[in-house]
Image (cartoon, rainbow, N blue to C red):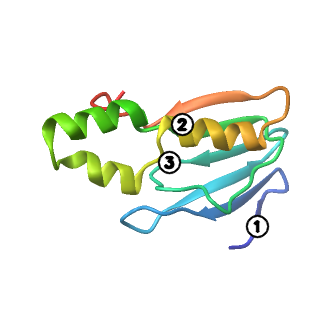
Amino acid sequence: MKLTKIKNHYVVSPVKLYHDVENCGYRLITSRKIFHATDTGTLKGITARNYDVYAIEGNYDEEVMNEKLKEEGYQHGYRSMRTHLSIQEREQFIKDNAGKEYLDLKLHQSSTYL
């Protein structure tokens, strides 16, 4: 994927994401660096070092999801685990990439699995 300049003020770089349909996230560079990703099962192999803003989904809590799956058997939760990031995966990505100061925007949270 290539960088695209818009009016010499912004740089937009799409990031391939992994969902059950084609999808991408974005690295946006303006006066700040912004990383945006939602509807993805993984961020492995992707970096966004020292960005100012991390706007990333945290769709479910792994412990809550595992308990729900034990109680209710096969359900929508299995799909969510394959196609969305857990809160824990999201937090680890930010921990691995963020500097000391950043804005954390929590996206795409499921009320069922939190």
Q: Tell me which label, 2 or 3, sits earlier in the chain.
A: 3
Residue found farthest to the bottom:
1
Q: Quadrant of residue 98?
A: top right
Q: Tell me which label, 1 or 3, sits earlier in the chain.
A: 1
Looking at the picture, tell me which residue is in the foreground, 104 or 30: 104
Front label number (1 vs 3)? 3
Mark 1 and mark 3 in contact? Answer it, CB < 8 Å: no
The residue identified by callout 3 is: 38
Looking at the picture, tell me which residue is in the foreground, 5 or 105: 105
Which of the numbered marks, if any, corresponds to residue 88? 2
Distance between the Cα atoms at labels 2 and 3?
Answer: 15 Å
Q: Quadrant of residue 106?
A: top right
Which of the numbered marks, if any, corresponds to residue 92? none
Front label number (2 vs 3)? 2
The residue identified by callout 1 is: 3
Mark 1 and mark 2 in contact? Answer it, CB < 8 Å: no
Q: Position of residue 54 (x, y in %)?
A: 67, 38
Looking at the picture, tell me which residue is in the foreground, 28 or 9: 28
Q: Tell me which label, 1 or 2, sits earlier in the chain.
A: 1
Mark 1 Cα-neighbour bin, 10 Å: few <14, some 14–19, many ≥20: few
